[in-house]
Amino acid sequence: MINKLLAKRTKQIDSSGIRKVFNLAAQMENPINLSIGQPDFDLPECVSTDMINAIKTGHTKYTLTQGTETLRRNIIKKYYGDKYSMDEIIITSGVSGGILLAYLTILDEGDGVMLFDPYFVMYKQLATFVGASVSLVDTYPDFTITKEALEKAYNDKIKIIMLNSPSNPTGIVYSENEIKIVAEFAKKHNLLVVSDEIYDCFSYDSQNISIANYYDYVIILNGFSKKFALTGERVGYAIGPKEIIDEMIKIQQYTFVCAPASAQKSLENNLDYDFKPIMEQYKRKRDMVYEGLRDVTHFTKPLGAFYAFPILKDNRNASEFVEIAIKNRVLIIPGNIFSQYDTAIRISFAQNDDVLKEGINILKSLLKG
């Protein structure tokens, strides 16, 4: 009976493979969890203090659907100067909420989305959920973007290119040349670029470059889950052309309503928080993973985010290797969660040093074996 009641769209998407491992971790005793993209540092004290004060002073009610005026104004001033106006930004329920709103606003059933493979799992699943098709741009083996790969993946149903730099799962930060290639391609085919820049502050060796510097038809998605360790409070934003933002606001009225009020309030006056010391810690963790596993995998060095995506040698199956790793208490994610290929493993190095070091040693031993 229940199966007959379920909408067909629920059958078209799978439960998140990342969440499956996350749930598994809760059942294991002392797992070495290198699977989930959750910062291991605490919420900055200035933010937590202001959030407590916000709750105590009654900032727990609805805000404007598009977010508080102060937070929107301060985001524009801090990150974008005078490039955007107040009617070109919406505060979303995390970047995840921004992705869904953008898809619902732009995509009709049968429209297409281009994804760079490997891709963040949500991009594909939500596209399928709204009835869109997905076209994959192959970036293997070193996760670079080329004109040839873009043209090969293109078809006339495509309306959106999803861009993610720094990238989850690879940690790649696209070069200025690669960003320009995407901008020129999008302009040629009159496409919207949805640019997920949630990891922009985790850029270790060069500054992340936004495609909005080279192309106007862009929705930037960003937020505070990663840089402020605020993953559970769900505060992100989308910024871009007013005509699109207006429609996203309208859809948010009937879905998320607004992002959490106390979390919005806590961020209003803390956008100048100095994130550099944390970034330096994560750069060191990145180097630990890279130096530990580069000799036993095909490893493109992550330049940003807090993930690594080493490809296994000798055509080894990643899902089978992940099963072995889990039996040895190390939780990682198989590459086929993020890709058409099952050749790589995703490692999150958002962990304390001792746990990370132990996990690397076990993985290295298993890969040698």
Image (tube, grey):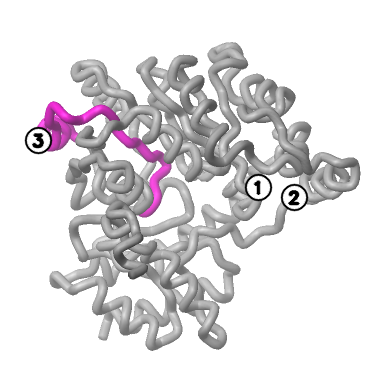
Q: What's the magenta region?
A: 146-169
The residue tagged 1 is 228
Q: Is residue 321 magenta?
A: no
Q: Earlier in the sequence, mark 2 or mark 1?
A: 2
Of all residues, the one furthest to the right in this rendering is 57
Callout 2: few (<14), some (14-19), or many (20+) C-alpha neighbours within 10 Å? Answer: some
Q: Is residue 154 magenta?
A: yes
Residue 310 visible in the shown view: no
| Amino acid identity at mark 2 | Pro
Left or right: 313 in relation to 169 = left
Residue nearer the viewer, 252 or 51: 252
The residue tagged 2 is 44
Q: Earlier in the sequence, mark 1 or mark 3?
A: 3
Residue 134 visible in the shown view: yes
Left or right: 112 in relation to 70 = left
> At numbered mark 2, what does the secondary structure look like: helix, strand or loop?
loop
The residue tagged 3 is 152
State how far apart marks 2 and 1 are (Cα): 7 Å
